[in-house]
Image: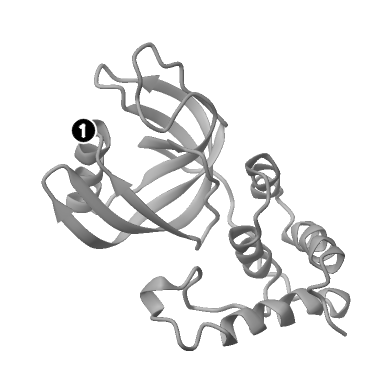
Amino acid sequence: MATLSIPLFPLGTVLFPDGVLPLQVFEVRYLDMMRKCIDSGSPFGVVLLTHGSEIRKPDSDEQFEQAGTLATVQETLEATPGLLKVMCRGAARFHIVSSERKPNGLWTADVELLENDHAVPIPSELQGAADALDRVLESLGDIPEDRWPLLPPFQLDDCGWVSNRWCDLLPLPASQKQMLLTLDNPLIRLELLHDMLDEHGLITS
């Protein structure tokens, strides 16, 4: 597996590969990090906070999950003194090998990149999840693309992509999303999401 040294951005959310992540950055440590990532085109890591706050506080004790997702800045939406609005996109998943907090409060880590989901066609018994997602896409027609919660290329025939987009869209507890992120089998991930959608009446025959 490939290894990488990256800055970390602990957040109260879980980012999935190909997911969309809008950010409003105003803390000095993250403004500096984000500008360096933009200038160099390098990624940062999004990890789920398990203790502490997204905003640094005196004597804060940030703790976070040891698996996360690389993020790259796709677009700068607004930049004013002390505030940076950016649109980011999820890339590869990773596992933290070691991490360190710098004097300015920024976390950095050596991470091991995890293998991307293998392409797995959607079996007929799970097709309802893809069809339901297709209906969501159709409903976005009148909304500007820069406000869509998911972006092309759309892969409605792939278990990993469909399951990840439902993870983005459904209001699941962060801990449950983290569990789904760490599942290596995209077919099992989609089976779990299909069951959730069926329970909420979102699967139609």
Q: Does 113 sit above or below residue 193?
A: above
Q: Does 119 sit above or below residue 153?
A: above
Considering depth in this image, is 14 or 96 the residue closer to the camera? 14
Considering depth in this image, is 93 or 10 the residue closer to the camera? 10
What residue do we see at 26% from left, 16% from top?
103
Residue 159: name its quadrant.
Answer: bottom right
Q: Left or right: 120 with respect to 54? A: right
Q: Left or right: 52 with respect to 29? A: right
Q: Where is residue 54 in the image (x, y as percent from the top left)?
A: 41, 33
Q: Work out which quarter of the rendered image holds the N terminus and state it.
A: top right
Q: Work out which quarter of the rendered image holds the C terminus and state it.
A: bottom right
Q: Left or right: 23 with respect to 111? A: left
What residue do we see at 53% from left, 45% from top?
13
Q: How many marks?
A: 1
Residue that protrudes farthest toward the top in the picture? 59
Query: Which residue matches tag 1?
Result: 28
Q: Does 168 sit above or below residue 141?
A: above
Q: Position of residue 165 (x, y in %)?
A: 61, 65
What residue do we see at 36% from left, 27% from top?
107
Q: Does 37 sit above or below residue 75?
A: above
Residue 6: name its quadrant.
Answer: top left
Q: What residue type is labelled 1?
A: Val
Badge 1 local density, few (<14 within 10 Å), some, or many (20+)? some
What residue do we see at 44% from left, 82% from top?
143
Q: Find numbered disc 1 in the image and state the secondary structure of the residue it sits on.
A: helix
Q: Position of residue 138 (x, y in %)?
A: 58, 87
